[in-house]
Image (cartoon, rainbow, N blue to C red):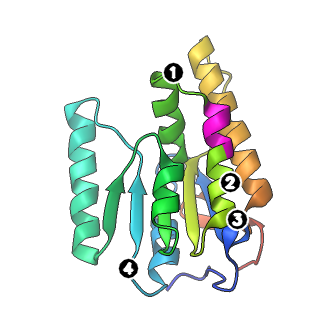
Amino acid sequence: MSILSLNLSETGAQGAVLVLGGARSGKSRLAEEMLTALPPPWVYLATGRAFDAEMQERIEHHKASRTEKGWQTVEEPLDIAWALKTYAHLPVLVDCLTLWVTNMLLDDQNVEEATQRLLDVLQERLAPTILVGNEVGLGIVPENALARRFRDETGRLHQRIAAQAGQVIFVAAGLPLVLKGKGL
């Protein structure tokens, strides 16, 4: 069991946890530990798309590891609000918000509208929700307009979710730092 735990008395957005960190920081592992501390079943809402063979291998590896542990995987690259509403009564881990924004930008979707739908659905959730995102705004300013837009969209998304979530955790080098909510 993780040293961080979910408050089962909170529902809606206050029952949501936002876990941020860099690539390979340990954020997904922490999120999985937190959710699996609850009784199953658990839903893994995967937003990744396989645009090449390497990504396809990553996706297959992750799916196989979750299946062995009893996760129900739902692959939804765009309409995560729909998926969260569909599974409103089950604990859900969304991994990850960053790929979700990528998918929306590549498909020319309205990120602001989708973000608002996500926030609205989080208010209605009956079970805990953990959302994982890469904190991409800590590095240098990107050199092209699309990359800058991506950085800006993810930053705004994280801020809006953090404002509503009951707990926000930043992970670096596998170590969690509670930014909001109950501490360690």
Asked if residue 17 is positioned above or below residue 37 in the image, the reply reads above
**Disc with the residue nearer the chain's start (2 vs 4):** 4
The verdict on residue 183 being magenta is no
Observer-nearest of 135 and 89: 89
Is residue 53 placed above or below 124 in the rendered structure? above
Distance Cα–Cα, label 1 vs label 3: 27 Å
Mark 4 highlights which residue?
41
Report which residue position mark 2 lands on.
120
Query: Mark 2 or mark 1: which is in front?
Result: 2
Whichever of callouts 2 and 1 sits on the residue coming sooner in the sequence is 1
Q: Which residues are magenta?
A: 111-116
Q: Secondary structure at mark 1?
A: loop
Name the residue that disc number 3 marks: 13
Give coordinates of residue 40: x percent, y percent. 39, 83
| Mark toward the start of the polypeptide (1 vs 3) | 3
- Mark in front: 2 vs 4: 2
Find residue 148 and report its image quarter. top right
Is the Cβ of the residue at disc 1 closer than 8 Å to that at disc 3?
Answer: no
Residue closer to the observer: 12 or 56? 12
- Verify CB contact (< 8 Å) between mark 3 and mark 2: no
Is label 4 in a helix, a strand or a loop?
A: loop
Q: Which residue does the image show at 65% across and 42% down from the upper left?
A: 115
Report which residue position mark 1 lands on.
108
**Magenta stretch: dominant secondary structure:** helix
- Contact flag, marks 2 and 1 (Cβ < 8 Å): no
Q: Could you tell me the amino acid type at mark 4?
A: Pro
- Please state which amino acid type lies under the numbered disc 1: Asp
